[in-house]
Amino acid sequence: MLWDAGLSTRLTGSALDSVGQPIPGVPFEWTSGDLSVATVDDGVVTATGDGWTEIAASTSGKTDAVQIVVVTPDGPRDRTDCSACHGDEYVQKHGDSNTPMTCLQCHSGPTWTSGDFDHPSVANGFDLLGAHASLSCTACHEPDGSPKYLGVADDECVSCHQADYDGQHAGSGTPTSCLQCHTRDSWSGAEFDHPTVSNGFDLMGAHASLSCTACHESDGSPKYPGVADDECVSCHQADYDGEHAGSEYPTTCLTCHTPDSWSGADFDHDVQYFPILSGRHQGKWGGCSTCHVDSSDYTNFSCFACHPHFQDRMDDKHSGMSGYAYDSDRCYACHPAGEAD
């Protein structure tokens, strides 16, 4: 093929004997079938206009010919319509790969070699990384090379993969920042480290089965402040208020509850600590703060909020007791069931 009028190329001929060996020094007569397309002089073919012609070489009554195609800018065939002449080359190189026939995106005019296609340059920066590099062109492009999807940045996966997202995460509220969990090599094997991206909050127990939107906005931002695993009330104030409002229960939820469920709380003050629902204290306590005077530390309690022991009663009841100490821990040491006697 010649790409414009005035361009030339040289053809050579050779004569072979009956066993296929070259015969040196044989002269050839060269002719062009259409001088308006190309002329030929001693094997040098020069383009004169758009179209095609056969260039023939003859000697000793034998003739052979090749086809020469000339494509000019104003000719009936556009320069970019390479496949009109090079269908065979396309099939040999690309087979059924669905490579588009916009040949000049990769090849230069004078030669098929040195194909150099820079996808990011023609696709608004989208690079063929990971699994994208092995896809056929028609996975993302129409037969004419136009894109099926919007040109997007490398991290806007859902612009092309909405169907993949819907198939896996529909209704889950999972954010569409796909590369937080997936890689470009495969959708499978997603790995998301929640503690690392949430200031140490691990998805334990019931949290592991929640949808992302239970705790996050649609853009992935948290609805609640980043908290440690034991600061339950930071997210569950409504749960606390619904169950314990006005009870003065401490907000150290994991003392009674587990991360698996709010139900089945395991806290029995009478058995685990001190009998307040039985014995002489039954019906007499007025809430946690009656004895637990420090709301920030429920291990600190005071018997004397209800039992102000005056000195005369102390002397009467505890005379002769060496080492007596006027504090709650010592009271509880001798009166573990809250009984005076």
Image (cartoon, rainbow, N blue to C red):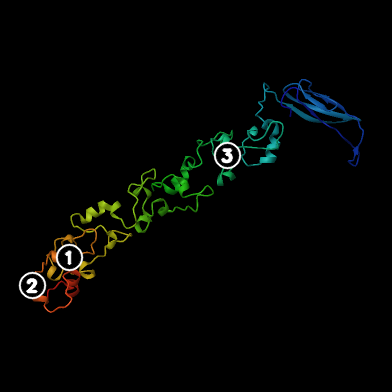
Q: Are the residues at dot 2 and dot 1 in contact (C-beta closer than 8 Å)?
A: no
Name the mark on residue 20: none
- Asked if 56 appears above or below 118 in the picture, the reply is above
Q: Are the residues at dot 3 and dot 2 in contact (C-beta closer than 8 Å)?
A: no
Earlier residue among tags 3 and 1: 3
Q: What element carries label 3?
A: helix
Q: Mark 3 points at which residue?
A: 138
Q: Mark 2 points at which residue?
A: 313
Q: Estimate the x, y position of residue 169 in percent, counting from the top left.
A: 42, 48
Earlier residue among tags 2 and 1: 1
Q: Which of 85 and 7 is in front in this view?
A: 7
Q: Estimate the x, y position of residue 20 in percent, counting from the top left.
A: 88, 41
Q: Decide: few, some or many residues near mark 1? Use Cα within 10 Å; few <14, some 14-19, many ≥20.
A: some
The quarter holding residue 320 reads bottom left
Is residue 264 in sight in this rendering? no
Structural distance between the alpha carbons of marks 3 and 1: 78 Å
Q: Which of 170 and 234 is in front in this view?
A: 234
Residue shown at the point (47%, 39%) measured from the top left: 159
Residue shown at the point (54%, 37%) measured from the top left: 125
Tell me the kind of residue under disc 2.
Arg
Tell me the kind of residue under disc 3.
Thr
The quarter holding residue 102 reads top right
Judged by depth in the image, the label closer to the viewer, 3 or 1, is 1
Structural distance between the alpha carbons of marks 2 and 1: 18 Å
Name the mark on residue 302: 1
Q: Decide: few, some or many residues near mark 2? Use Cα within 10 Å; few <14, some 14-19, many ≥20.
A: few
Tell me the kind of residue under disc 1.
Ser
